[in-house]
Amino acid sequence: MKILSLLNKPTSGSLEINGEEVGENQSAFRRQIGVVSHQTFLYNHLTAFENLAFYGRMYEVPRLRERISQVMEEVGLQYVLGDPVRTFSRGMQQRLAIARAILHSPAALFLDEPYTGLDQHAVEILNQVLLGLQNQQRTVILVTHNFDQGLNLCDQAVIMVKGQLAHQAGREEFMARDFKQVYLRCVEGS
Amino acid sequence: MGYWRKLGALVGKDIAVEFKTKEMLSSMFIFSFLVIVIFAFAFTPSRATTREVFPGILWIGFAFAGVLGLNRSFAGEKDNDCLLGLMLTPVDRTAIFLAKAASNLLFLVAVEAVSLPLFFVLFDYRLEGPLWLLLAVILLGTIGFIVIGTFLAALAANTRASEILLPLILFPVIMPVVIGAVKCTAIVLAGVPPELKGELVRWVQLLGVYNIIFLTVPLMLFDYVLEV
């Protein structure tokens, strides 16, 4: 995930985004990426609006106010725009983190265990956002230990064991087979 | 142009956070004030010794208050992994360093602006040299202190005991700046006697060179520091 997010450089192999190899000038590629992690990357003492406005300036988002209203509506937080993030519940903070990640309309969104600590409402909103991105033909890579959540959303599933790609399956395969058994075999066989 | 706009946004964010929390400014100012009060009671204002140690006391107050601020400057970025969030954005890493240094400089200058008159009042000290020169020398020393301090604060931020580590790694590196700043301040406070003009120029040159080196080195290495 860190290599995909351009935080670490690969020691071997190469990284391509939209068919273009990522070189030394990574700024252009960073614009095309959104990341949601366990951590929200939000400033607790700033309001939701101030946080999004700050990140919007970093990504040079055009018509920023308009876009902030739009993403806040998408994650169902438009009513707390002026509230400091420290007053938010974990679920609200994670929803705001999703708003932050999609603010600049990234071509690819990477999510690392985004369901951790989310209430049911927040899970529903996250699923809606992810399905919306899927409909917009955007790439979403979701890392999760929750099989059902992951399989419900994805059209390609990859099992990683000890950092190695152990199995890859399309939607048809993992719907037809008991994918949990495949996973267990991969883990036990490692 | 985008670079400077982003740098401005980063500084603006630091100011907005500080305006709301007042964590750095309040602790820096209280510390500086305590130094003034303690030393004002320890030394009799009229004595010649006081006049000799005054520049040192001034810089003790500034430097230690500055360390308190530097310790907090990256602590806020560690909450919720905000520094990682910044690294994900398409902003040049040097802009992150320069913005952090600029906001740290702004906060320390604000503390100095309030505490400097207090130093003069409580020590009953009369400035003999030109005020603009004193302010220029203090600014030069402060810039040196902040650029090195910001770089090392970023380096220490990812360690477990960063608040202890920072002064330990900062003060040996900062020593030439502090000595230079104290010497320059002493000469300016004494009214820049003609026989000390050459010495003042040499110390100012040392501060200038040190500032240039430590403004250049972090710009080259900050990328690696963030990756640690």
Image (cartoon, rainbow, N blue to C red):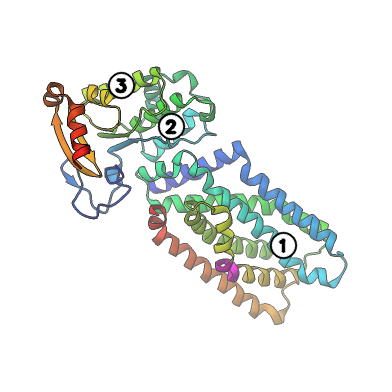
Residue in the image at 63% along x and 40% along y: B22
Query: What element does badge 2 sit on?
Result: helix
Q: Are marks 1 and 2 in contact (CB under 8 Å)?
A: no
Residue A160 covered by magenta stretch: no
Spot occupied by residue B29 in the image (x, y as percentages of width and height): 69, 49
Query: What element does badge 1 sit on?
Result: helix
Crowdedness of circle 3 by 10 Å Cα count: few (<14), some, many (20+)? some
Q: Is residue B83 above or below residue B125?
A: above
Q: Which residues are magenta?
A: B172-177
- The residue that disc 3 covers is A127
Residue A19 placement, left or right of B3:
left
Tag nearer the camera, 1 or 3: 3
Spot occupied by residue B160 in the image (x, y as percentages of width and height): 51, 51
Q: Amino acid at mark 1?
A: Leu
Residue B2 placement, left or right of B50:
left
Q: Tell me the chain of label 2.
A: A
Res B124 visible: no
Residue in the image at 33% along x and 36% along y: A35
Q: Magenta: predominant secondary structure element?
A: helix
* Mark 1–mark 3 distance (CA, rounded to whole Å): 59 Å
Residue A133 placement, left or right of A79:
left
Spot occupied by residue B79 in the image (x, y as percentages of width and height): 50, 40
Disc assigned to residue A43: none
- The residue that disc 2 covers is A52
- The residue that disc 1 covers is B58
